[in-house]
Image (cartoon, rainbow, N blue to C red):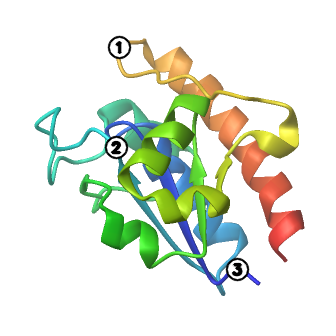
Amino acid sequence: MFNRVLVVCTGNICRSPIAEVLMKELLPKLTVESAGIAVTKSHLTDAPAHPHSQQVCTENNLDISAHTARQLTPELCDSFDLILVMSHAHIEEVAMLSPGSRHKTMLFGQWIGLGDIEDPILEPKASFDTLYKTLVRATNAWAKKLS
């Protein structure tokens, strides 16, 4: 049984904040949070969600305006039952950071046949609209598995 789910991407400002809020909407009984693998390295600690991520959420009646980016740590990995990542590379990075967490790390897009959900960081808003639709599909699939 999974009670605590951590959603992970690279900078914790584009993909994982959207996925986090979608998971919270569909699975209100679970604790869902997010983090990024390269937040500190990218100088994004406490940064707000990307403006396009915020806009896409606002357009879909979701609010991520209070989101702040945080670095993934071994302690954070240890405190969650399931870690959902956006790419195969993230699986390996989580495993290097927290070897004991490898068995509970899975792809966010797994149940919709997607290995990697690409980072739209430098893309136009239209890419974030596409990302949102992909994350909705993946979240719906995870909600079925976790409920």
**Which numbered disc, 3 or 1, marks the residue closer to the eye?**
3
The residue sitting at 47% across, 57% down in the picture is 99
Residue 53 sits in quarter: top left
Q: Is residue 72 left or right of residue 79?
A: left
Q: Is residue 130 above or below residue 3?
A: above
Q: Are marks 3 and 1 in contact (CB under 8 Å)?
A: no
Q: Nearer the viewer, residue 118 or 64?
A: 118
Mark 2, secondary structure of its residue: loop
Residue at point 15%, 54% (across, down)? 46
| Gap between marks 3 and 1 measured at Cα | 34 Å
Q: Which residue is mark 2?
A: 37
Q: Earlier in the sequence, mark 2 or mark 3?
A: 3
Q: Which residue is mark 3?
A: 2
In this rendering, would 51 be left or right of 92?
left
x, y percent for residue 18: 51, 48
> Is 59 displayed left or right of 106 in the figure?
left
* Image spot of residue 107 (x, y percent): 68, 44
Q: Foreground mark, 2 or 1?
A: 2
Mark 1: few/some/many CA within 10 Å (<14, 14-19, 20+): few
Residue 62 in view, yes or no = no
Q: Where, quadrant-wise, is the N terminus in this rendering?
A: bottom right
